[in-house]
Image: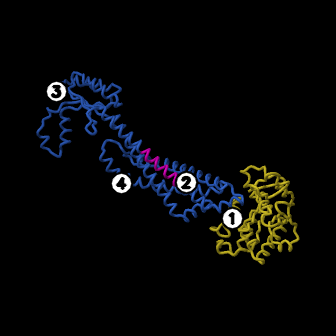
Chain colours: A yellow, B blue
Amino acid sequence: MIKFENVSKSFGSIVALSNVSFEIKEGEFVFLTGPSGAGKTTILKMILREYLPDSGKVYFDKEDITQIKEKDVPLLRQKIGIVFQDFKVLPERTVAENVEVALAVTGVEENEWEKRVDHVLKLVGLSKRANLFPSQLSGGELQRVSLARALVVNPKLILADEPTGNLDWDTAAGIMELLEKINKEGKTIIMATHHQGLIKHSKHRSVELKEGKV
Amino acid sequence: MSIHTKTAIEAIKRSPFQAVSAIFVLALTFFVATTVAILVYASNKSLSYFETRPQIIAFLKDDAKADGISALQNKLAIDIRIKDVKFVPKEEALAIYKKATEDNPQLAELVSPSIFPASLEFSVTDLKLAEKIIEEVRSEAIVDQVGFTANLGGEKSLGDVVTRLKTISYYLRLGGIVFVGVLAATSFLVLLVIISMRMTSRKGEIEILSLIGATPKFVSSPIVLEGIIYAILGVAIGWTTSFIMWLYVSPSLISYFGEIPILPKSPITYFLLFAIILGTETLVGFTLALVGSLVAVKRSLKKAK
């Protein structure tokens, strides 16, 4: 589903990725690991087409996404669910509205929203928090909102950038459980993390990065 | 309610002072625009009135015979440059005088019909032709003097009347266009500033939306909609205020100007005139808001990249 082919990227004199190649198959759960600055986030941003490589190719569903036009980037992103370390929820919208935004963005008919929002909020355990604002939620709950928003559009791929980075161990384990559950339902998950404990407890493959190299 | 409308209304509620300033400036623009439009309409109508209905009076000599008068009347009636030819005998001239001086009956008693000459009154189809026609009529044997009744501000010649009216009309249009133009430019800039501020305050939200796949159209829709809401409210308030003002002053103005049709006397035409102005202003307001918000959104998105 995702294939990096000899991808290099530099920011001025800093080399973020150097001739990186790897492949992730559909339905896999893969950790991107490595210390800070190793290039984990750069890889996720390339999949989202936030960054273009200096050289090499990035394939998503066999399509070289480095070649797609700027106007088609939103369509690519609509196929991907993303979970951020800092949650990135909309502070002035309720939990349910935060999830609805993703449906509005992808053009899902409004009459389907309620059913789909209810379903994902139940899945992440936030049904009773649907009408609360982000300021009324804990870190773990905010991450669940982020996850619900990523899931509601039924994406083929979920990118999680340090989703447990701001959470305590128990809450992080809860989020991991959810991601495992989602993966079992057939979603491909790429999770960037430097949380060694989580990696050790998991049987999934890791792509380890060090100074921009796999 | 669509998600974009909801977002736009929430944004207006969150910054009511910004919204009020935008609506106020737009309302002022459209109030002035409506007022100027009516003034230009009135000046055009009065100019047209004087251009098309200048009344010329050919005072006839005392010894003018009925057949001579009739011949001249017929000659004038078939002239395509002339219309509404009317013979006013001495008695009718006295009656007109009496009516004009009815506040002071003694003035009427002091005069006899013999001092008022009979006359032929007529209008010309185009004021430019009036001077030539006056000269021609003056040369007729039975005509003593020729007078032109349209007289503004003490002008002595026909040229002065036309020139004065045209000058008034020209400066009214020019002044109106400049004033409305300056106000429209101010409204445009206010919209740009407010929408740019809105984009800055929504920077985080726009970044998130973009990452989850929102198209630039999706991101800009609530902001453009907000601009359109300001414009529609501005037009509605500005136009309504001006309309109420004109409704209030119209009876006095129509009565003051009498025969000069500065404003439509028929209610249907009157409301139609204002409806046309409202339609035009809505279109202009919509365009102003659309262009203003799109420019602001485009600039902000470009900066964000």
* Residue B186 circle label: none
Where disc 2 sits, the SS reads: helix
Disc 1 residue type?
Glu
Q: Which residue corresponds to mark 2?
A: B192
The disc, 4 or 3, on the residue closer to the chain's N-terminal end is 3
Where disc 3 sits, the SS reads: loop
Nearer to us of marks 3 and 1 is 1
Q: Position of residue A156 (x, y in %)?
A: 80, 61
Q: Which residue corresponds to mark 4?
A: B248
Where disc 4 sits, the SS reads: helix
Tag 4 near tag 3, CB within 8 Å: no
Residue at x 33% of width, y 50% of height: B251
The disc, 4 or 2, on the residue closer to the chain's N-terminal end is 2
Report the quarter where the N terminus of chain A lies: bottom right
Mark-to-mark CA distance, 3 and 2? 75 Å
Residue closest to the far left: B110
Q: Residues within 10 Å of mark 3 (few under 14, many from 20)?
A: some
Tag 3 near tag 1, CB within 8 Å: no
Q: Which residue corresponds to mark 1?
A: A100
The disc, 3 or 2, on the residue closer to the chain's N-terminal end is 3
Residue at x 76% of width, y 63% of height: A81
Disc 4 residue type?
Tyr
Image mark 3: chain: B
Nearer to us of marks 1 and 4 is 1
Q: Nearer the viewer, residue B252 or A86?
A: A86
Nearer to us of marks 4 and 3 is 4
Residue closest to the far front: A13
